[in-house]
Amino acid sequence: MIRMTTDPIDPDALRRELFDPAAGGYCAFEGWVRNENEGHEVLRLEYEGYQPVAVAEGEKILAEAAEKFPNLHAHCVHRTGMLEIGDCAVWVGVASAHRDEAFKACRYIIDELKHRLPIWKKEHYTNGDSGWVNCERCAEHAHGS
Amino acid sequence: MKTITVRYFAMFREQAGIDEETLSLDATTAADVFEHTKGRHGSSEPAGHCKVAINDEMADWTTPVEDGDTVLLFPPVAGG
């Protein structure tokens, strides 16, 4: 299951949803909003996503993980909207029989999500500028002033 | 000529100043649509850094476009 939400992410509640008596290992990744990027002080991050395609692509990634690492339960939640420093922007949780596949599947899922989902983030800087992350032209525009 | 609806996201939307527009284009592939609208979304990003979806399905730049399609132009993604 993958979900996009504008509400705060509650990792404890998500962890409980994954509980499975057959699972001997649980691994989670939380992506947090940090206060610095490439030398610029970040005040907050604004996430935008295109839900229909992001959810479909996210389900594909979870299916790929399930194929690579059998007996896996995996969930993911990605937040959109305006986030403050320290907020959880993305959560990936994996429960499986053994720790090795839990670690590997969690890593696979977050890496693929970052590269494939139509989600964008705009950094708002302490100096009042802003810029889209990974967008060279916008970064030049924001940082060049 | 084909009637194609083009939707812009994130930086592309801001550069274009609109969410979407319907264009009459002589386009064969998704790459043709991207090239044709480059002036509108003001991007110097190469297509290889960007992604495209057609009618809400992820596509490749070589995917053919048909009359009536909606082409979604995604600037470089940055989830997580």
Image (spheres, coloured by chain):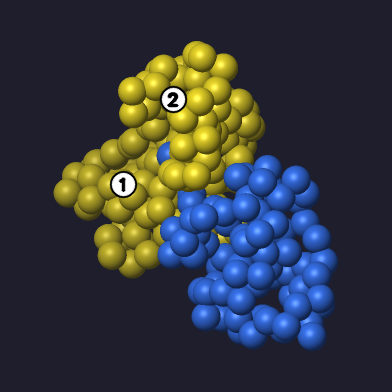
| Camera-nearest label, 1 or 2 | 2
Chain letter of the residue carrying label 2? A
Q: Residue A70, located in which quarter of the rendered image?
A: bottom left
Q: Which mark is residue A45?
A: none
Chain letter of the residue carrying label 1? A
Chain letter for the yellow colouring in the rendering: A
Q: Which mark is residue A33?
A: 2
Q: Earlier along the polypeptide chain: callout 1 or callout 2? A: 2
Q: Is residue A95 left or right of residue B51?
A: left
Provide the secondary structure element on which disc 2 rests: loop
Residue B51: % across, % down: 52, 62
Question: Do discs 1 and 2 belong to a common subunit?
Answer: yes
Tell me the amino acid under the disc marked 1: Cys
Provide the secondary structure element on which disc 1 rests: helix
Tell me the amino acid under the disc marked 2: Val
Residue A25 vs residue A50, the one in the foreground: A50
Q: Which mark is residue A106?
A: 1
Residue A67: % across, % down: 33, 67
Circle 1 residues within 10 Å: few <14, some 14–19, many ≥20? many
Chain B pictured colour: blue
* A121 over A115 or under it: above or below: above
Gap in Å between the C-alphas at discs 1 and 2? 19 Å
**Residue at the image point whose x is 33% and y is 50% from the top:** A111
Residue B50: % across, % down: 50, 59
Q: Is residue A125 left or right of residue A69?
A: right
Residue B40 vs residue B75, the one in the foreground: B40
Q: Is residue A112 left or right of residue B35?
A: left
- Looking at this rendering, what residue extends furthest in the top direction? A126
**Residue at the image point whose x is 30% and y is 53% from the top:** A108
Residue B79 vs residue B32, the one in the foreground: B32
Residue A112: % across, % down: 37, 54
**Residue at the image point whose x is 64% and y is 85% from the top:** B28
